[in-house]
Amino acid sequence: MAQKLQPNSPETLLALALYQFVVLQDYELARTTYRLVSKMLPGNSDVPVSLASIARRQGHWDETVAYYEQALVLDPRNPELLVEAALNYSDLRKFEAALKLCDRALDILPNDPDVMAFKATVYQAAGNLEEAAKLLREVNAETPSLVVFATKIGQLKLERNLSEALRLLQARVALYHFGSELEKGAFTKDLADTQRLAGDSAGAKITAEKARKTLEPICKNQPDNDFAATCLSQAYAVLGDKNSALKEAERAIALKPSAQYAAYGPGLEENLALVQTIIGENSRAISTLARLLEIPYKSSLYGTSITPALLKLDPTWDPLRADAAFGKLYEEKRR
């Protein structure tokens, strides 16, 4: 209807470009349309942001940086844009640049919990747990944001304070009114995995069974939901159902293959490495992690791409430490 009324208006063309990008997934056609709009609206920061999103999808990382920087020149005090650009830098493991953008966002939104949590994940990825902890000090089981709460749990795991992580997760699962069954299943799965890390194998399996019962119907009803598939794969792994765990993890990868989703696909391979670690396929997990350390991507486990510091600190990877090949992943790359 918009095309019938004003086919050549920049607003109509913006909507068309978004349709070409998201629905048709015709990236080159969308790119052409966005560039046309950029000539009509040279001061519109949405255009370079959208072009950055296309470049991320295609794995053209140098372009993503250029487009985000262009957008920031046009809209330098947009906190959402600052954080989005910081996220892109963190996926590239350019942590100093990411932290500077976080600070710019916090100058505009002082003490914003979401920005502070993201900044904490950058410090975590760099191995600076002390600075990360300062930013998460006020987070508790009643913190509204699921992302902020998950960042706190991640911090406690990296600190190997598993008893406190368990306490917070148990309180969250018991008291929090989750917005969906998927949220509930995801946090129940996280609780099971934390119990496993703390050495409570029996309790972990009881909790993982609850997660399985919640997540299986979701995966059946939403077969294209890759997040649900990763959660279910981890629940199966904790239960010791190796075949189902691998099958579900590989199904998630097939939903968003790296060849088509350069930014997000590798994060699903990261989940496969986690499943492989839990079920004892150590050499395959190490091979997967070695490959992921060499590329930028959006993590499914952390706030940034996996780093040597995260491999060294996270107890998740403890089963791999007896293998010298795993030690080389974080010791050699730290030099």
Image (spheres, grey):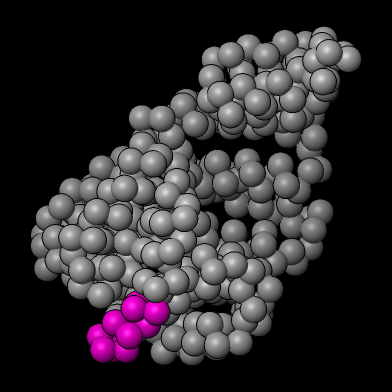
Looking at this view, is 151 or 1 the one in front? 1
Quarter of the view holding residue 159: bottom left
What residue is drawn where x is 41% and y is 30%?
260
Toward the right, the furthest residue is 5
Instruction: Give percent across and percent down for residue 219.
Output: 42, 57
Instruction: Give percent across and percent down for residue 261.
Output: 43, 34
Classify residue 22 as left or right of residue 113.
Answer: left
Instruction: Give percent across and percent down for residue 287.
Output: 18, 48
What residue is drawn where x is 68% and y is 21%?
17
What residue is drawn where x is 33% and y is 41%?
254
Looking at this view, is 282 or 206 the one in front? 206
Rendered view: 58 above or below 269: above
Looking at this view, is 181 or 97 the one in front? 181
Quarter of the view holding residue 44: top right
Looking at this view, is 11 or 72 the one in front? 11
Rendered view: 204 above or below 187: below
Q: Quadrant of the N terminus?
A: top right
- State whether residue 132 appears in this view: no
Residue 206 lies in the magenta-colored region: yes
Residue 14 lies in the magenta-colored region: no
Q: Please state the total of marks drawn on the protein image.
A: 0
Classify residue 308 as left or right of residue 115.
Answer: left
Majority secondary structure in the magenta region? helix
Rendered view: 206 above or below 63: below
Classify residue 197 as left or right of residue 55.
Answer: left
What residue is drawn where x is 53% and y is 19%?
26
Image: magenta residue range: 198-210
Instruction: Give percent across and percent down for residue 192.
Output: 37, 79
- State whether residue 88 appears in this view: yes
